[in-house]
Image (spheres, rainbow, N blue to C red):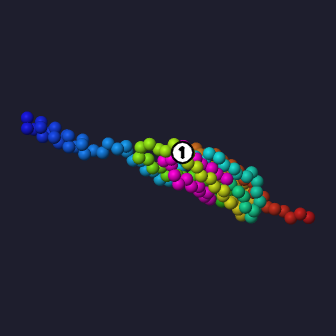
Amino acid sequence: MKFLTLISLATALIFSSCQMDPASENYTNVVIPIDTRTVPETGYVDVPLAIYAHASMPNGCWSNIRFFFLEKEEYLYELFSLADFVSNGACPDVVVTNDTLIAFQPKTAGDYVIVTWLGQYSNELDTIRVEVITPEK
């Protein structure tokens, strides 16, 4: 009988010391979809091009949306966005957004491929045909 009382007391102590708060979730550098983008179809060598991108997330647990435009190879670039997620239960009912305008200045003529990440596993390609400005005769 003494043993059962001891087990019951130990069980009560263990359960009463547990926090019953919702679990905290904290993620950084999560790839999020770019929902709108504008990539020009043509351009000229040494003339800046404007590439626009916009991303949004559905609730206030998301923050710090930022964009990256990286050269992967000579004519291949990646455009993606990252965000942070912190939750201690319920998330505020607010849409979190950010956008950017990237100035891209190609140095040589050719077809530049821009890979835009729409999520961790999906992307879309855009091609910019860049030509040399020829002087008028």
Query: On the rendered image, what quadrant is the N terminus found in?
Result: top left
Amino acid of disc 1 = Val
- Give 34 or 135, whichever is nearer the viewer: 34
Magenta span dominant secondary structure: strand
Q: Is residue 74 in view?
A: yes
What span is in magenta? Answer: 52-72
Q: Is mark 1 on a helix, strand or loop?
A: loop
Residue 54 lies in the magenta stretch:
yes
Name above or below for residue 42 compared with residue 35. below
Q: Name the residue under label 1.
A: 94
Residue in the picture at 58% in, 44% down: 122
Residue in the picture at 47% in, 44% down: 91
Residue 58 lies in the magenta stretch:
yes
Q: Position of residue 65 (x, y in %)?
A: 55, 53
Identify the residue at the far left of this view.
1
Identify the residue at the far right of this view.
137
- Residue neighbourhood size for the residue with mark 1, other residues' Cα within 10 Å, grouped as few (<14), some (14–19), many (≥20): few
